[in-house]
Amino acid sequence: MIRLNLLPQDEKGRRSGARHAESRSSAPRTGSSPMVYLAVVPALLLAAGAAGYIYHSDVYSVQRERDEMQRSLASLRQEVQQLETQYANLREASRIYEQQVRVLDMLMPRNRILWSEKFEQMSTCIPDNVYLTRIGVDERVTEIRTPESLAEQAAWEAAPRDERGPAPAPVTVPSIIQTLTIEGIAFAEQTDQRIRLVLDFKDALIAHASVNEQGQPRRFMEQFADVPRIEYNRIRDVAGVNVNEFRMVIPTVDLATLGAMQSPAPPAAPPPGEVAQSAPAGSAS
């Protein structure tokens, strides 16, 4: 069948334009307005800037904290070095003080021989016809290194050269040795009798034993290092009479070492929080 469009020409145009406009409005939009970009881009830049600021702020804070810790560590190291130096100085001062106290203890009169007692003992040992012409006491004081100081020096010398520090300072103590010299003459008709008298005097000194006023046993040879040594026993003419002239020498032990052995041990350090009680000083003989 043939279809006929009986609409007027102008009405046909309006309907065609309306359908075309309707199709345009119902079609999906595929583009974006430039205003959207203008709004989004600054927001993204602002967010990126804020993130960067926060990141750099955290890094700066960590760096600053690290620098402060390094400064604190350097300060602590310096304080430790100062304390180590002070400790070394105090330790050296303490060593010197202890050494001085030890030397004074060795030189105390109580550690020396009471010669008046020795002379009284000796008077009881002199045989008849033996006459003493001279009694003398000589003293020799020298400085010797302590065993600890010698061991410290040996350990320093045994260490590799690249590991050695300063050489240890020598620590010395006095060595006090006294020598008793006895000179005299022996009178008898026969030479062998005179020689026998001198030997009897020597044996009597070695065998002497007695008791002092306090009831303590005493011996003449106490504190002597060796038996009497006869340096000479020779014939001499005295006013036309033959006598035997003799000399005996008796060295003592090292009185400084003896004094250190007899000196009381220093008191132990008190426990923390307690006050150390001072020990009474020993009385001199």
Image (cartoon, helix red, strand yellow):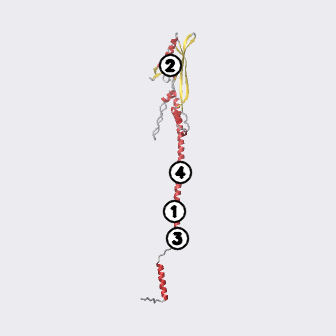
Q: Kindly identify which numbered label has been placed on residue 278.
A: none
Q: Nearer the viewer, residue 51 or 98?
A: 51
Farthest residue in the left direction?
1
Distance, label 3 to label 1, CA atoms, is 21 Å
The location of residue 284, given as percent across then percent down, is: 50, 28
Q: Residues within 10 Å of mark 2 (few under 14, many from 20)?
A: some
Q: Kindly identify which numbered label has been placed on residue 70.
A: 4
- The three-letter amino acid code for the residue at tag 3 is Tyr
- The three-letter amino acid code for the residue at tag 2 is Met
Tell me the mark number nearer the camera, choosing from 4 and 1. Answer: 1
Task: Compare marks 1 and 2 and give the one earlier in the sequence.
Answer: 1
Asked if residue 261 is positioned above or below residue 237 in the image, the reply reads below
Residue pictured at 51% horizontal, 12% vertical: 192
The location of residue 170, given as percent across then percent down, is: 55, 34
Q: Tell me if residue 246 can be seen.
A: no
Q: Kindly identify which numbered label has been placed on residue 51.
A: 1
Distance, label 3 to label 4, CA atoms, is 49 Å
- The three-letter amino acid code for the residue at tag 4 is Gln
Residue pictured at 53% horizontal, 51% vertical: 70
Asked whether the beta carbons under mark 2 and mark 3 sit within 8 Å of each other, the answer is no
Q: Nearer the viewer, residue 9 or 134?
A: 9
**What residue is pinned by disc 2?**
122
Farthest residue in the right direction?
239
Distance, label 2 to label 3, CA atoms, is 128 Å
Q: Quadrant of residue 184?
A: top right
Task: Compare marks 3 and 4 and give the one earlier in the sequence.
Answer: 3
Q: Nearer the viewer, residue 257 or 60?
A: 60
**What residue is pinned by disc 3?**
37
Q: Tell me if residue 51 can be seen.
A: yes
Tell me the mark number nearer the camera, choosing from 3 and 4. Answer: 3
- The three-letter amino acid code for the residue at tag 1 is Ala
